[in-house]
Amino acid sequence: MKIDYLDELLTLIKSTGATPEQYMIEHSLFFDNAVVDFAFNELLTKLRAAQSIHVRKTTKKTLIYKVGSQNVWKSIYKNIPDLNVIIDSDGNRKVRSLITNLTGETISQGVNSSIMFGKISHIWGEATNPLFFTALWNIVLVPAYFNDILDKNNGTHPFITRIKEIYKSICWTKYNVDNKLKALGLTQKEINQYAPDVSVLTGLTYKLTVIPMKTIAGSTPGLKTRKTSCSTNPFATYLRKVINSRGRHYSNKTIGSYCSALNCHDFQTVLTKHGLSVDIYQCTDITALKKVYDEIKKKTTSIARKIRDERHGSCTSAIREYAGYLRNNTLATNDSGQSFS
């Protein structure tokens, strides 16, 4: 006797009037781009600061080795060094925490979960790879009865191969995954091994359900902003020595307004949109800063208009002086002499 319960499930889904592909996608939960981008920039900031990042435990001793008491992941990429890692305590604790901090939703927390009988699905797998484990572009929340389908290997059933490629293609295009992998340091050849065949989306109709960023009273809980005091901020120290366009030193009040502008929530939202860390003092890319400057200066978006209206130009002035600070201290990168005027 041979029974294929997946075929039975697909037949049941078709009885609803939807295709199995459409049904699965529309009953899954994807993250808003702002959530994905913020988590990615946090990871990027940690990598640049050589901080430890989380990874799922593996039994393959070739992937993790010890340096004293420190766990180290052996890099599989040409331009990325071995990384200090923290072994996740139960296989998904850090991921659950990240989701809750950024969205307010809880999953795999028993009866206290806001998303009941749901599973955290790593679409590319790779949970033992620290660059993929907490990457929300690699994660979709799915009903528990779909998770086994996505966990199965390609080739075990034609539908499994197809649906996994569809999920990857949606995430790849929605979250600009190729650019994220490039920012991490992967070569184009290494990126190509993860690239799905996005042609599988041709002719497929679906509507995504998206989990937004958690916001309360204009702030974003879980987004930890480094508010550096103007008395210790190296940028503020630099400003005290600058002679402004009027031939005078900046007052403490003006310096304070510049620091405040670079730490405000709306400005951090614009930074995240351009793929930068919410902590402006981690950014040294002049070309990226110029794009942020131009958006706010020209008020090309609603949030840029809001910043200009509320900050009266202090934000663009602060960006211009921050670019000067980077250049004068030989900290600037990707600099082709752009003018901030």
Image (cartoon, rainbow, N blue to C red):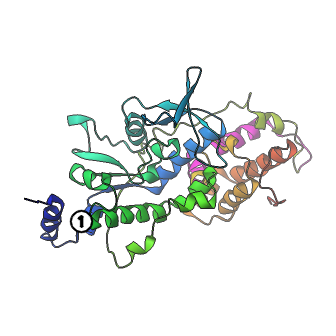
Magenta extent? 246-270
In the image, residue 214 above or below residue 110: below
Residue 118 in sight in this render: yes
Instruction: Report x, y in % for residue 68.
Output: 59, 20
Dot 1: within a 10 Å radius of its alpha carbon, few (fewer than 14), some, or many (20 or more) residues? some
| Magenta stretch secondary structure, dominant | helix
Instruction: Report x, y in % for residue 48.
Output: 66, 40
Which residue shows up at 71% across the image and 37% down it?
A: 256
Is residue 28 shown in magenta?
A: no
The answer to which image quadrant residue 72 occupies is top right
Three-letter code, disc 1: Tyr
Of the 4 image quadrants, the one containing the N terminus is bottom left
Q: Nearer the viewer, residue 128 or 48?
A: 128
In the image, residue 139 above or below residue 300: above
Instruction: Report x, y in % for residue 278.
Output: 60, 45
Q: Which residue occupies the extreme top position in the image?
A: 68
Q: Which residue occupies the extreme left position in the image?
A: 1
Q: Nearer the viewer, residue 22 or 197?
A: 197
Q: Is residue 17 left or right of residue 198?
A: left
Total labels: the figure holds 1
In the image, residue 30 above or below residue 234: below
Residue labelled with disc 1: 23
Q: Which residue occupies the extreme right position in the image?
A: 247
Disc 1, SS:
helix
Instruction: Report x, y in % for residue 206.
Output: 31, 70
Q: Is residue 253 left or right of residue 119?
A: right
Is residue 253 shown in magenta?
A: yes
Q: Is residue 136 left or right of residue 115?
A: right
Q: Nearer the viewer, residue 51 or 236?
A: 51
Residue 274 in sight in this render: no
Which residue shows up at 71% across the image and 49% down it?
A: 314
Which residue shows up at 43% across the image and 37% down it?
A: 56
